[in-house]
Amino acid sequence: MDYFIQQLINGLTLGSIYGLIAIGYTMVYGIIGMINFAHGEIYMIGAFIAVIGFTLLEMAGLGFVPLALLVVLLASMAFTAAYGWTLERIAYRPLRGSFRLAALISAIGMSIFLQNYVQLLQGARVKPLQPVVTGGLTLLESEGFVVRLSYVQIFIIVLTLVLMVGFAAVIGRTALGRAQRACQQDRTMATLLGIDVDRTIAIPFVLGAALAAVAGVMVAMYYGVVDFFMGFIAGLKAFTAAVLGGIGSLPGAMLGGIVLGLVEAFWSGYFSVEYKDVAAFGILILVLLFRPTGLLGSPEVEKV
Amino acid sequence: MAEAVAVKAGVSRFDLPQVLKEAALAAFVAFLLALPLAGLHLTAGDQGAMVVETRWSWVAIGVVAVFVGRLLLAVLRAVRPATRLSSGVAERGRQRFAAYLPYAAVAALIAAVALPFLPFSDRYIVDLGTTVLIYIMLAWGLNIVVGLAGLLDLGYVAFYAVGAYTYALLGTTYGWSFWVCLPVAGTMAAFFGILLGYPVLRLRGDYLAIVTLGFGEIIRIILLNWVAFTGGPNGISSIPRPSFFGLPFTRRPDEGEVPFHEFFGIDYSGEHRVIFLYYLILILALITNLFVLRIRKLPIGRAWEALREDEIACRALGLNPTNIKLSAFALGAMFGGFAGSFFATRQGFISPESFVFIESAIILAIVVLGGMGSQTGVVLAGIALIVLPEIAREFAEFRMLVFGGAMVLIMTWRPRGLLSHREPTVRLAPRGKGAG
């Protein structure tokens, strides 16, 4: 039972991270119906900026942790958002009128490019990060097994919740969100009503990148290492989470992330760590087989 | 005509303040991008802890390069106004080009056959030729799936791996010969193709792409972790080499075997095997090519193309999309399996590292760059993508960077590839006549 609770906590933490990345996929898919294959790389860039930021602040002697956290979070979000915007501008906007596979192949190219770009600039070696937030709460203790909830985990889960609520409010209640939803439903009509479609399409890339950056900061703090290749598998899993929840749906992305995180944590806890990725992709295939619209998605109707 | 050009040129007049503003904006974005990753470098310090060092010059270079580049782009656009070739001219050019293609193909074939005996050929060039041919064969196999049937497969390397491991395991454990294993490897790969394809082929384009990508990863993870069966990260070594109709290419053969050089009464040379492998893959690749060219004219090949153009119309005509897609998937996988077993016998050693996603991406890039569906385009693209990086060896670390960037640029500039061949093989009425 103790072990179960521990895995539950780990799964929730992991799931929060997946969920934040998945939002980027689901938003972009919702508005232009395309998989932003390079989104995993954006998350990786966010994590790199986080490690650089923490190291820089440590060198500067900024010891007050909450302030350092805030600074790194904001900086990472801002710079990563710039990457998201540029990505859309260079790799996707010129191809908007082209056929579907062209955009996907361009995205794959961008993903390879960004990976090697970071590798060239920062080196291929794994970058460690000293623990920023240490300590935690001991929830249960019995027969030598301790259930721990570390402060980093609390931070991750709480920040994810806050961001999700804030994000849902932005999409649901502001003019920006209305423009998003309008473009999602009918781009031509939105243009006729005076919505700047180019800008509206760029926004999910920017916001998605900012959320991926938060996920990157969290991962850097949680695992304490980053490398240039980390975006590939994480991106694939976050995409799985988005599909699991129903692509195009924001709560779905979050739910999918949590479910996937839990599956992965329990799978590694009870079966085998080596095959946890196989479990995640197996879920992707199963979901697409039996419920292609995902848990919360609406069915897609193709008109002839 | 002249008037029209003048009007167009007038529209795209060079507006200096606007251009400068755009270039400044681009430079500012470049500054934002370069600052954290190029300007700050994370490295291990003297005491072992990580430190950040600054590289402001890199940022400056990047920003200036982007500014100048953006200006040049604007100047280029202004100097060369929108006088694109009208579609008729372009079409005629393409047709004239297409008329030469059969001759080019024959010339390429002669060149490929003669390659090992050309005066400048050495072991290195024949080896490189073998590598290029492996990729061309893989790309031709993938072309069935991507080019003809229009299904994006990002996990093609999985079938390549299945073929390679099938031969490696059968060859090392049971001592089966390459020639027996070749069909077995192809069948295994086709079987895996059906196994994956059956559940997922109902999915639409990009879902399918991601699922195949996930499948490729699953295969790789299994190969990596099932140590008892596949040797895990250490791979499988001393895979038996192929023989020339029972004549091995060794200096000192086993008891009762006659080696190749003794049988033909020539001196032993290590190059014999290299040249033999080269011709082997050449023949395998040509068989793949012939197969694809012929099957396009059969009902199944036409069904693939029809499905690529319009799935709903196909359903309405009573074609079963699942079976058609499945056949494309299985046949594509089969050729991947053939190429895989050749790869295993050529290398003599395989490990999961040879079957990573980037290989799938390279094969896909060859197909796409060649113009999905064009057999000749694949050859051109294969040579370009494998030989060029080989020549630019000193810049090896920039290889994949350029590769990724080129994929983006090609998609922007020529989304249909170098030689686009989306023409259906058959038409109801000749071009320009009939219902049109």
Image (tube, coloured by chain):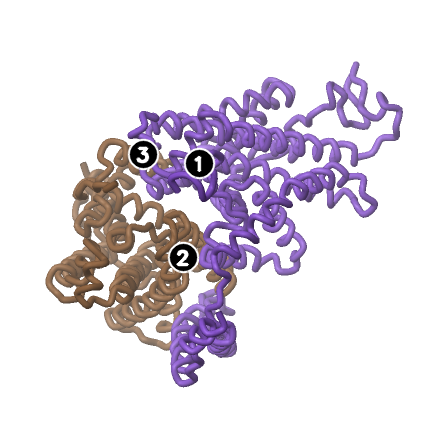
Distance between mark 2 and mark 3 Cα atoms: 49 Å
The amino acid marked with disc number 2 is Val
Classify residue B248 by image quadrant. Answer: top right
Relative image position of residue B322 (x, y in whole percent)? 35, 27
For residue A121, side relative to residue B277 (left or right): left
For discs 1 and 3, the disc positioned in front in the rendered view:
1
Q: Which mark is residue B429?
A: 1
As drawn, A55 above or below A228: below
For residue A241, side relative to residue A96 (left or right): left
As drawn, B146 above or below B407: above
The amino acid marked with disc number 1 is Ala
Between residues B376 and B381, which one lies in front from this camera angle?
B376
Distance between mark 2 and mark 1 Cα atoms: 60 Å
Q: Which mark is residue B313?
A: 3
Q: Residues within 10 Å of mark 3 (few under 14, many from 20)?
A: few
The amino acid marked with disc number 3 is Ala
Q: Residue at x 47, y 56 (%)?
A: B87
Colour brown maps to chain? A
Relative image position of residue B165 (x, y in whole percent)? 54, 29
